[in-house]
Amino acid sequence: MSLIKALSAATDSLITSGTTKIFGFTQKRSGAGWTDWRMIKDYKKRMVVKEHAVDRIRVNTLRKNDILPIEIREAASTELHNNFPRDSNLNRVVYRCMVTSRPRGNLMKFRLSRIMFRHFADYNKLSGVQRAMW
């Protein structure tokens, strides 16, 4: 849990100052720090998933194994629900546009929404992307 506390302290300093040093990189966003509060929330969820992913997959594998006795599977199920945070599930991470924080219509390869992708493609800001011409 120390990573979560350190992360929340880092994001709090980011909100107040506008710059912070995360993983050795100085990151600055316009305005109050991030595009909006949803990006901060999503970033925290990603860090929780990163911290608990390996253990969660192991326990979930035990829970779904049909060969093991029912007692072990029930113990794994209760451990999964009681000992892991809810946000450690990968399904709770929302893939957002990195520019506008839009949650829908994203191109995973570029991490942009369809609107920003088209805008950047129009002005030749994306490498290897060209508008269709015929």
Image (spheres, rainbow, N blue to C red):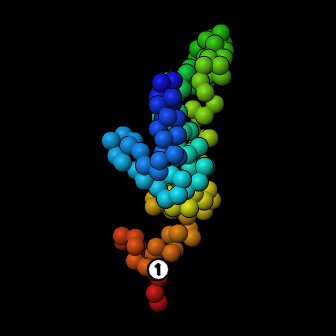
Residue 129 location (% of width, % of height): 41, 73
Identify whether 8 is placed above or below 98. Answer: above
Name the residue rendered at 47%, 38% in the picture: 10
From the viewer's side, name the closer residue of 29 and 108.
Answer: 29
In the picture, residue 113 is in which quadrant?
bottom right
Tell me how many marks there are: 1
Name the residue rendered at 57%, 70% in the picture: 115
Name the residue rendered at 62%, 56% in the picture: 103
Residue 112 location (% of width, % of height): 51, 62
Residue 50 location (% of width, % of height): 47, 34
Identify whether 68 is placed above or below 43. Answer: above
Name the residue rendered at 59%, 43% in the picture: 41
Mark 1, Cα crowd under 10 Å, few <14 / some 14-19 / many 20+, is: few
Identify whether 68 is placed above or below 126. Answer: above
* SS type, badge 1: helix
From the viewer's side, name the closer residue of 59 and 85.
Answer: 85
Extreme-left residue of the structure: 24
Residue 60 location (% of width, % of height): 57, 25
Report whether residue 64 is seen: yes
Tag 1: amino acid: Asp
Extreme-front residue of the structure: 17
In the picture, residue 85 is in which quadrant?
top right
Report whether residue 77 is seen: no
Extreme-bottom residue of the structure: 134
Q: Mark 1 points at which residue?
A: 122
